[in-house]
Amino acid sequence: MYIKPGSMLGMLGGGQLGRMFAMAAQQMGYRVTVLDPAAESPAGSIAERHLQADYLDAQALHELGTTCAAITIEFENVPAQALRTLAQRCVVSPDADSVSIAQNRILEKEFLAGNNFPVGPFIVIHNAQDIHQIDPALFPAILKISQFGYDGKGQIRIDKAEDLPEAFSNLGNRPCVLEKRLPLDREISVILARDRLNQITFFPIPENRHEQGILDTSIIPATLSDEITAKACELAGQIASKLNYIGILCVEFFVLEDDRILINEIAPRPHNSGHYSLNACITSQFEQQVRMLCGLPHGSTRLIQPAVMTNILGDLWKNGEPAWNEILRHPQAKLHLYGKRAAKPGRKMGHFTVLAETIEEALQHTQRIRQDLQR
Ligand code: ADP
Ligand code: MG
């Protein structure tokens, strides 16, 4: 049973990931309804319908559940209860249980550690009492709030135990995870698609470089040994199977200096580090998301050419509208903008991807474009 083109698909969340899903869905003949509380949003403005309401609004959920054939999400902070309610009426994937784990760092870490997936040393801090008698070996550390953190927000780097009470209070005394700060050699992510029959396809693995906790650049394919590639895919696939996950899943990994790999976090949706697939793969992560949601065959994830994806943040607007021609006139670069009206520092406004024969060449072109954009 598959969902036919022409059907209405529901998307919870109106951000850029929802927008790129909607574009892929529309390309394949589907229609899209977006539920998002904001009057204006990247996805809401291009979907056939936008329901402007809270994610738990009973009337909006009823409308979505009765008019959509299948429903998915574009960010993990959708209340899991909304997914449970919708699942009584139509196909919902990923399901509420997977999302509730991925949206809560404590549940996520406990799920991973509890199932013997490799994660770095951490402890859970529920309240101020938990702050005492912490193993000094955990420092230097990073304190992360359990919920609603993104792009490095809701995180404080801590060098020694004495600084923990103040950091905990600065994060609002909310439940946190305290992680040992690890000597990272590299960061990579595995993006996969899993269907109802446990068939899994993987996208080529990006290497991800961050600036101030925000993804800056993804380089594809990451230069990895066959062992690390195989291990990362195996682990990510096992996580998806353990969750009985249906849809697109991203698993972020740390590669340590001694070549060990540890799982950082999971995202129950397409991922910023997979945006390169829009231009560099036969099938993008968003098209694959549509395919999984509708019960269609997996598309080929073959890489057409090495690629470098660079995020465009609102900071670039400090001297007015950026000089887009620096990207557009480049024969191997593709520009994507998300239609956001207000450019704020740190806000993801778009990205560009450079394709080339080699990674080195793609990096060189990217570097030149970045310099020209800055002028
Ligand atoms: P977010 O939800 O904001 O993506 P992450 O937990 O992935 O949060 O952290 C953002 C970035 O901060 C990571 O990609 C990595 O660069 C750095 N980071 C996070 N945790 C650690 C750690 N334990 N050790 C070293 N670097 C870390
Ligand atoms: Mg992350």
Image (cartoon, grey):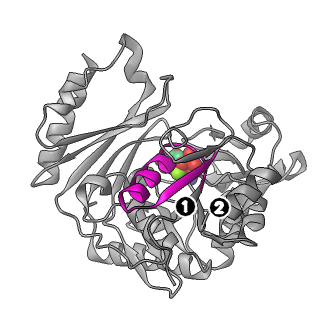
| Picture residue at 19% right of the left edge, 57% below the top | 306
Q: Is residue 228 left or right of residue 114?
A: left
Which amino acid does the dot numbered 2 rest on?
Thr
Side (left or right) of 222 relative to 345: left
Element at label 1 = strand
Q: Could you tell which of marks 2 and 1 lies nearer the N-terminus?
A: 1
Instruction: Find disc 1 in the rendering and name its residue.
Output: 8
The answer to whether residue 256 is visible is: no
- Identify the magenta region: 11-35
Pointers 2 and 1 in contact (C-beta within 8 Å): yes
Instruction: Determine which residue is flagged by label 2.
Output: 67
Furthest residue in direction bottom, as rendered: 197
- Residue at 47 percent of width and 23 percent of height: 343
Asked if residue 281 lies in the magenta stretch, the reply is no
Quadrant of the rendered image containing residue 94: bottom right
Q: Quadrant of the C terminus?
A: top left
Residue 18 is inside the magenta segment: yes
Instruction: Tell me the SS state at disc 2.
Output: helix
| Towards the viewer: 211 or 123 | 211
| Mark 2 → mark 1, Cα distance in angstroms | 7 Å
What residue is drawn where x is 35% and y is 72%?
A: 228
Front one among 202 and 212: 202
The crowd level at tag 2 (other Cα within 10 Å; few <14, some 14-19, many 20+) is: some
Left or right for 352, reference 107: left
Q: Looking at the picture, how far across and down is residue 221, in whole percent? A: 25, 61
| Residue 145 locus on image (x, y percent) | 71, 46
Instruction: List the single residue furthest toward the right.
Output: 129
Q: Quadrant of residue 339?
A: top left
- Above or below: residue 313 compared with residue 19: above
Q: In front: 260, or 6?
A: 6
Along the horizontal axis of the image, is 363 left or right of 118?
left
